[in-house]
């Protein structure tokens, strides 16, 4: 009082949270936004061009930037988190991905191989979200799960299961009904064993839109169901890709911040990025 310094509580701690994209904002530099690639190359040859990416702000840590080519209609896709890119991995090896793509594909061994999403990138479970996965399965199992760190409680998980000669895609979720917490399942129609065992990449999309959940396989709707209640949000817990009995390859495992539309799913289920680069001949 009277301008005198107090004898106690004389220090304060000010915490400034991460803000304004501290890890950077990225774009192609001006010279890389309009490039020409020679077309007069020998049959079986290739033509390459370098495109420079600029980090315009942010100084936190080392970062990895991934970009991909989409058709013009793909510009309306909602924001997403690439769960494999945003994870620390255990016992995973790189594998061959789907044709005309260059994002990393990982081989899961059904034992110890996992990709655990780093805390900073944990997505929030809201009333509407979507998950998109490309897989080449060898053995069924849990594809991903969000739940308690000790594994005792799962907000939701997506699995490929095998039963009586057929495969099914399954969304198991936990919902809140006062005062109880219950679980329920949304399961696809039967999928022939030969369909998944053809050695090709297959695209699975699970969408949640308010009170409705849908499952798509290779652009075909294979399940639609009304949820029993809102999925319990465990965004501050652990999000793991793999870790169960699933054996096979996963690529482009992405969490979208809203429910994907039918048109969005058509775009994502289409051919790889290279197919969207159209030569101009003449």
Image (cartoon, rainbow, N blue to C red):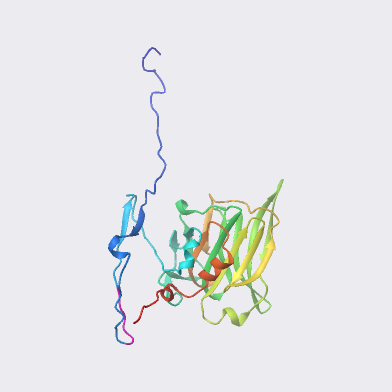
Q: Can the viewer see residue 182? A: yes
46 relative to 220 in the view: left or right: left
Decide which of 257, 108 is in the foreground and name it.
257
Q: Quadrant of residue 46?
A: bottom left
Magenta stretch in the rendered image: 43-48
- Work out which quarter of the rendered image holds the C terminus and state it: bottom left
Decide which of 16, 264 is in the foreground and name it.
264
Measured as percent of width and height from the top left, residue 229 is found at 69, 54
Decide which of 201, 80 is in the foreground and name it.
80
206 relative to 35 in the view: left or right: right
10 relative to 154 in the view: left or right: left
Measured as percent of width and height from the top left, residue 253 is found at 50, 65
Q: Is residue 93 one of those drawn in magenta?
A: no
Q: Residue furthest top?
A: 2
Decide which of 124, 38 is in the foreground and name it.
38
Measured as percent of width and height from the top left, residue 226 is found at 70, 60
Q: Residue at x 52, y 68 (%)?
A: 133
């Amino acid at each position: 009082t009277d301008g005198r310094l107090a004898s106690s509580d004389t220090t304060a701690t000010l915490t400034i949270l991460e803000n304004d994209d501290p890890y950077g904002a990225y774009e192609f530099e001006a010279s890389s936004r309009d490039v020409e690639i020679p077309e007069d190359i020998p049959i079986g040859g290739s033509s390459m061009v370098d495109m420079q990416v600029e980090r315009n702000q942010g100084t936190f840590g080392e970062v990895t930037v991934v970009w991909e080519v989409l058709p013009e209609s793909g510009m309306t896709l909602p924001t997403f988190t690439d769960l494999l890119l945003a994870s620390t991995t255990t016992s995973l090896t790189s594998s061959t991905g789907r044709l005309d793509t260059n994002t990393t594909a990982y081989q899961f061994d059904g034992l110890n191989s996992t990709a655990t999403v780093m805390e900073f990138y944990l997505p929030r479970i809201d009333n509407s979200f979507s998950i998109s996965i490309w897989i080449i399965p060898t053995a069924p199992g849990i594809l991903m799960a969000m739940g308690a760190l000790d594994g005792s409680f799962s907000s939701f998980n997506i699995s490929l299961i095998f039963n009586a000669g057929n495969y099914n895609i399954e969304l198991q979720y936990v919902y809140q009904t006062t005062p109880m917490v219950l679980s329920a399942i949304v399961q696809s129609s039967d999928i022939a064993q030969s369909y998944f065992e053809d050695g090709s990449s297959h695209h699975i999309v699970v969408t949640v839109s308010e009170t409705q959940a849908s499952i798509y396989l290779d652009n075909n709707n294979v399940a639609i169901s009304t949820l029993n209640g809102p999925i319990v949000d465990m965004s501050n817990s652990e999000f793991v890709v793999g870790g169960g009995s699933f054996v096979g390859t996963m690529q482009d495992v992405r969490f979208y911040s809203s429910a994907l539309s039918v048109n969005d799913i058509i775009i994502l289920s289409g051919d790889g990025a290279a197919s969207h680069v159209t030569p101009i001949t003449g």
